[in-house]
Amino acid sequence: MEKENWIEATMNSTNGIAKATPRPGLFAAIQNRIQTQEIVSPTWIWLAAASLALLVVLNAKFVFSGKHKNEKSTVENLASSISNSNQLY
């Protein structure tokens, strides 16, 4: 019986609560603020996309062009010169 009374009291606890109402001009203020926000120009979007594509192409060119050159790379040359003298400067 206590459990049923507790459930009933919990269910009826929201009966006296009033709904929240916004101030009258709030919706109009939100709409006005949305309309005044700046939109990014399509020219800038295309410029950013072209720059990204150029970077990808250049990176791919440099990564794949280095495989067919001479066997000893510049990193190996640098490592061998450092290991001879053990000097980093």
Image: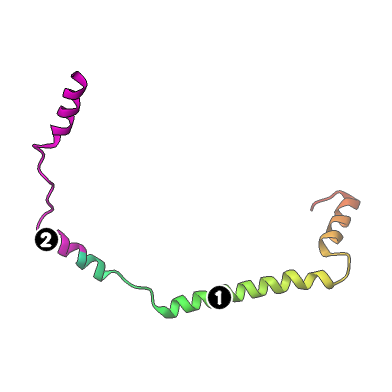
The quadrant where residue 73 appears: bottom right
Residue assigned mark 1:
51
Picture residue at 38% right of the left edge, 73% below the top: 40
Question: Quick one: 19 or 69, which is closer to the camera?
Answer: 19
Tell me, yes or no, whether the two marked residues, 1 and 2, touch with CB atoms within 8 Å: no
Residue at x 11% of width, y 39% of height: 17
Relative placement, left or right, of 75 versus 33 is right
What span is in magenta? 1-30
User: Which of the 4 image quadrants contains residue 34?
Assistant: bottom left
Residues under labels 1 and 2: Cα distance? 44 Å
67, 79: nearer the viewer: 67
Q: Is residue 5 left or right of residue 52?
A: left
Q: Is residue 72 magenta?
A: no
Q: Position of residue 33 (x, y in %)?
A: 23, 65
- Residue 32 at x, y percent in the picture: 20, 67
Residue 48 versus residue 21 in the image, above or below? below
Q: Could you say which is closer to the camera, residue 13 or residue 89?
A: 13
At mark 2, the secondary structure is loop
Q: What residue sits 66% from the left and 74% below the top? A: 58
Indicate yes or no whether the magenta region holds residue 14: yes
Q: Amino acid at mark 1?
A: Ser
Q: Position of residue 3 (x, y in %)?
A: 21, 22
**Mark 2 residue type:** Gly
- Name the residue furthest front: 1
Name the residue: 16% across, 28% down. 8
| Picture quadrant of residue 27 | bottom left
Residue at disc 1, secondary structure: helix
Q: Which residue is mark 2?
A: 25
